[in-house]
Image (cartoon, helix red, strand yellow):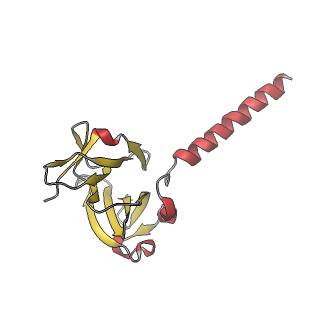
Amino acid sequence: MLFTIVSRRCSLAIAFVLVTVAVFGQGQFAGSMKDMLNQTYRNSRTIPALEGFDFQEGSLVSGVNDAEAMLVDVFNKDNTAIVFFSVMEDTTNKYTIMDVVEVKNIQPGWEVRTGFCRQRGVSSTDIVAVVKTSNQQYLKTVREAWKFNRTKRKFYPVNAKEVDCQQGW
């Protein structure tokens, strides 16, 4: 009897861990672009999954002298944006896509911003936000936002009310 109870608890614990990994792992926000995860490339404009998308922006988000180079890229097609963080960990000059966010239903007057966003007033190059454009220095109307966790190599959502992004004049 005791063995059965312990066995059931272990089974439940293992199931919980597996569900947690599946729900909160990389690709949680990738939508139809999950196949991009872990792909390698030298030039982001040649990634097959992005055929038909237009390059919007790309930024080096790591330090110039850091051991690994980290990039964030944004591509657009119609009212959809694809945002991904990539890492080059060695001297092969190939980047590996760590995580992807597919943003759908971007209406006119809204855009994806990276690199120059803040959370609670603290700048972070790891924040990606969908913002309403305006002529203000900081864009404070944010539909949704994510932050890339460099240690876990994945995006997680952040409270959009805590985020603003600098105008990109």
Image coordinates of residue 70 in percent, x first then y, are 32, 56
Please, which residue is most extreme toward the front here? 108
Q: Assign the N terminus to one quadrant of the image.
A: top right
Residue at 34 percent of width and 74 percent of height: 45
Report how many numbered discs are placed on residues in the image: 0
16 vs 102, left or right, is right
Task: Mark yes or no: residue 93 visible.
Answer: no
Residue located at (38% from left, 59% from top): 84
Query: Is 11 situated above or below 84?
Result: above
Q: Where is residue 102, by image quadrant? A: bottom left
Front residue of 69 and 153:
153
The image shows residue 89 at horizontal and vertical percentages of: 37, 58
Q: Residue at x 31, y 51 (%)?
A: 129
Name the quadrant of the C terminus. bottom left
Residue occupying the point 49% across, 59% down? 31
Q: Position of residue 32 (x, y in %)?
A: 50, 64
Task: Classify residue 69 by image quadrant.
Answer: bottom left
Taking depth in this image into account, of 154 and 127 the one nearest to the observer is: 127
The answer to whether residue 160 is left or right of residue 139 is right
Q: Is residue 68 left or right of residue 30?
A: left
Which of 60/27 is in front?
27
**In the rendering, at what x and y percent does residue 64 appear?**
22, 56
On screen, residue 44 above or below 23: below
> Is any atom of residue 131 visible in this view?
yes
User: Residue farthest to the right?
Assistant: 1
Q: Give the left or right position of residue 32, taking residue 166 as reference.
A: right
* Closer to us: 49 or 137: 137
